[in-house]
Amino acid sequence: MILSLLFLVAGLAVVIVGANILVSGSSSIAKRLKISDMVIGLTIVSIGTSTPELAISVISAINGNTDIAVGNILGSNIANILLILGISAMVYPLTVQKNTQYKEIPLVVLAILLIGVTGNDIWFDGGPINVISRADGVVYLFFFIIFMYYTFQIAGAEDVGDEAIVPQPLWKSVMYIVLGVAGLYFGGKYFVEGAVTIARYLGMSDSLIGLTIVAVGTSIPELATSVVAAYKKNSDIAVGNIVGSNIINVFMILGITATIRPLPLSATTNVDITVALYASVLLFLATFVLHARKVTRAEGVIFTVSYLAYLVYLIMNN
């Protein structure tokens, strides 16, 4: 048990460090190719903060722990909105950009609806089981390509970001990328092994540990980024980081994972899809209906309390 806890903590630490140095090396090379800071931020950095979810979901799927892979994505999306945005809004009210309100938040809602439709084969097709198939994964990846195209279009219409990325020597950038990929692989491998062992020891289902420990653990980069951004009153980063990560989690990470190995859905997954949809719609309503393009402290409290209620439900129904 102690060894598994060490694997869990050390594996997560290695994944996060690996993600950071991978982003650093990739950003440096992109800067050398004269790609703007805005494009780097909207692509490499936003994908980089989601690489812990990618590494752990892919490794879980390869090892046959598909409940952890699916739970990680749904749990991360729920935690990103209800917990991270909730805490961030309580630190400082968050203003939402018009593009985010009208285009990107609806895409978050669409992504969850896509999981509900493609994953419920029994309801929609009369199939023997509910599964996100390889074909579904390819569809998700097409949505990801469209999202990336949209992102580059937005970047082309915006000014270059304020924080310039300083290019590093080429050898150093390549070394960072290699070490980052290695860190993601080995850190993710040991994290999943530790999580599965602890789950079995405590009598927790793979789905529960994916939705809680794994989901919150892999969301630490988003948590740190958004809370610090909110403290510095930089709402664009705090909100954009979460919304972008949720879109990438479904379209890219779930797409890649399902393409590698079809992902059967457990009997309770529809509850988690419903909660993820609730969180996404709540964010949509908060910016459209309650306060124009803003998430207030009071709404942050509602988000956070909703997440705590969801955790209680998960523990009670393990």
Image: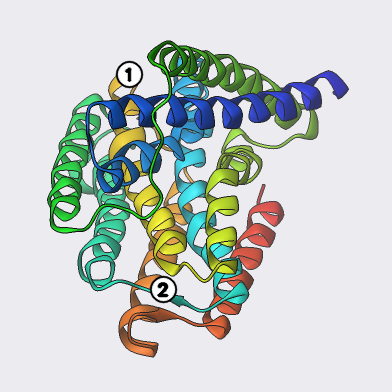
Disc 2 crowd, CA 10 A, few/some/many (<14, 14-19, 20+): some
- Determine whether, in the image, residue 193 is placed left or right of residue 166: right
Q: Name the residue located 79 percent from the left edge and 27 percent from the top edge.
A: 5
Quarter of the figure with the N terminus: top right
Amino acid carrying label 2: it is: Leu
Q: Residues within 10 Å of mark 1 (few under 14, many from 20)?
A: some
The residue sitting at 16% across, 37% down in the picture is: 145
Residue type for callout 1: Ile
Decide if residue 244 is in sight here: yes
Would you say 74 lies left or right of 104 here?
right
106 vs 96, left or right, is: left
Indicate how the structure is coloured in the image.
Answer: rainbow
The quarter of the picture where residue 47 lies is: top left
Q: Which residue is mark 1?
A: 260
Q: Secondary structure at mark 1?
A: helix
| Residue 76 versus residue 184 in the image, above or below | below
- Give SS at disc 2: helix
Q: Is residue 119 visible?
A: no
Which residue, given by chain and number where applicable, does mark 2 sit on?
A: 282
> Where does the image place residue 96, in percent across and percent down from the top left?
35, 73
Above or below for 153 versus 282: above
Instruction: Classify 111 as above or below 87.
Output: above
Label 1 to label 2: alpha-carbon separation: 32 Å
- Corner quadrant of residue 310: bottom right
Q: Position of residue 134 (x, y in %)?
A: 24, 25
Residue 133 on image: x %, y %: 26, 29
Q: How many marks?
A: 2
Residue under the image location 63 percent in, 72 percent down: 305
Q: Earlier in the sequence, mark 1 or mark 2?
A: 1
